[in-house]
Amino acid sequence: MIVRIMGEGQVKLDNAHFTELNKLDDELLAEMESGDEEGFRRTLGALLAAVRRLGAPLPDDALEPSELILPSPEATLEEVREMLSEDGLIPG
């Protein structure tokens, strides 16, 4: 799956990694619902770090459509809330 981190670029992630990413996504969703800004910031950073660590970066000139778009590390709680689906940021 091709994943874009807003403001950073794209990475290709193997579907096998989504179990780990979904755990972080669930934690992020719970922190957002409770208004835990500190936890939200920490978990968003951990989620994006995991995507960077597990994914293979695509070249900047690659024109692959992103199947998943994640917020930038500086995104606010409200900005991320607007990006959410029923499943959080990551479907499944």
Image (cartoon, rainbow, N blue to C red):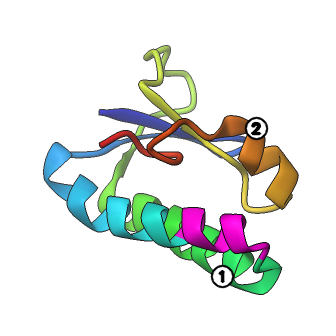
Residue 32 in picture, x, y percent from top left: 70, 65
Q: Along the line of sight, which residue is nearer the eye, 60 or 51?
A: 51
Residue 19 in picture, x, y percent from top left: 22, 60
Q: Which mark is residue 82?
A: 2
Q: Along the line of sight, which residue is nearer the eye, 72 or 34?
A: 34
Q: Residue 86: say if magenta.
A: no
Q: Residue at x 74, y 47 (%)?
A: 81
Quadrant the C terminus occupies:
top left
Question: Which of the two discs, 2 and 1, labels the residue nearer the N terminus?
Answer: 1
Vertical placement of residue 88 versus 25, above or below: above
In front of the other: label 2 or label 1?
Answer: 2
Secondary structure category for the residue under label 2: helix
Report, in whole angstroms, how far the alpha carbon at label 2 lies from the one at label 1: 19 Å
- Boundaries of the magenta span: 28-35
Secondary structure category for the residue under label 1: helix
Q: Is residue 33 visible?
A: yes
* Quadrant of res 35: bottom right
Task: Inspect the image, locate mark 2, and give the three-letter code of the amino acid beneath it.
Answer: Glu
Residue 39 in picture, x, y percent from top left: 68, 83
* Quadrant of res 43: bottom right
Residue indicated by mark 1: 42
Q: Residue at x 43, y 45 (%)?
A: 90
Quadrant the N terminus occupies:
top left
Q: Residue 31: say if magenta.
A: yes
